[in-house]
Structures are given as structure tokens and as C-alpha cells.
Image (cartoon, helix red, strand yellow):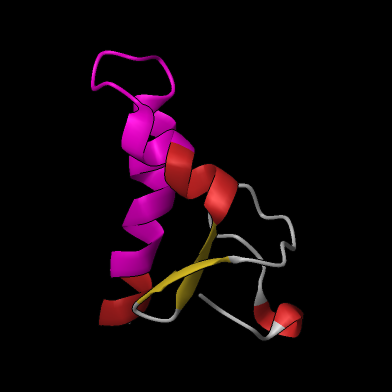
């Protein structure tokens, strides 16, 4: 888990949070991580999470 609160702006909710995970340098807060993992592909929130997570890939290739 990340310990630097200055850079803990979640790529999903875009809020600063104290704890979460980093995926290739991008921060995902614990709340969003939990929501992503528990969201079914047929849930209306699924495309939103896909778009947010796509940003990780886009940042890696740019």
C-alpha cells in the first residue's frame, strides 16, 4: 500500500485518499479497488471503470 499521501489521488474517483494500491505508478484507492473487483460485467458502472483503468495503459504508452 502506498504511504505518500501527497500523490494518492485515485485514478478512478479522482479524490485524495490515504490508502490504496499502485498499478504501474497510478494510484487506486481501497474503496475503488473494492468496487472494481466486485462489479459484474453487466453492471452499469462497468464501462466507467474500464475507461478509468484504460488511463493506466494510455499513460504507460505515452
Q: Main secondary structure of the magenta part?
A: helix
The part of the image, by quadrant, that contains residue 31 is top right
- At x 38% / y 44%, what residue is drawn? 51
| Front-most of residues 41 and 2 | 2
Is residue 51 on the magenta stretch?
A: yes
- At x 33% / y 39%, what residue is drawn? 37
Residue 27: x %, y % from top left: 52, 69
Residue 29: x %, y % from top left: 57, 57
Is residue 1 on the magenta stretch?
A: no
> Which span of residues is magenta-colored?
35-57
Q: Is residue 29 above or below residue 39?
A: below
Q: Quadrant of the C terminus?
A: bottom left
- At x 73% / y 55%, what residue is drawn? 15
Q: Is residue 48 above or below residue 7?
A: above
Residue 42: x %, y % from top left: 26, 13
The part of the image, by quadrant, that contains residue 9 is bottom right
Q: Could you tell me how many numbered marks the image carries?
A: 0
Going by the image, does 60 lie left or right of 27?
left
The part of the image, by quadrant, that contains residue 11 is bottom right
- At x 44% / y 23%, what residue is drawn? 45
Amino acid at each position: 500500500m502506498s504511504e505518500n499521501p501527497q500523490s494518492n489521488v485515485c485514478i478512478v474517483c479522482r479524490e485524495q485518499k490515504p490508502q490504496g494500491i499502485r498499478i504501474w505508478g497510478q494510484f487506486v484507492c481501497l474503496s475503488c479497488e473494492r468496487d472494481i473487483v466486485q462489479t459484474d460485467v453487466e453492471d452499469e458502472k462497468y464501462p466507467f471503470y474500464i475507461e478509468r483503468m484504460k488511463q493506466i495503459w494510455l499513460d504507460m504508452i505515452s
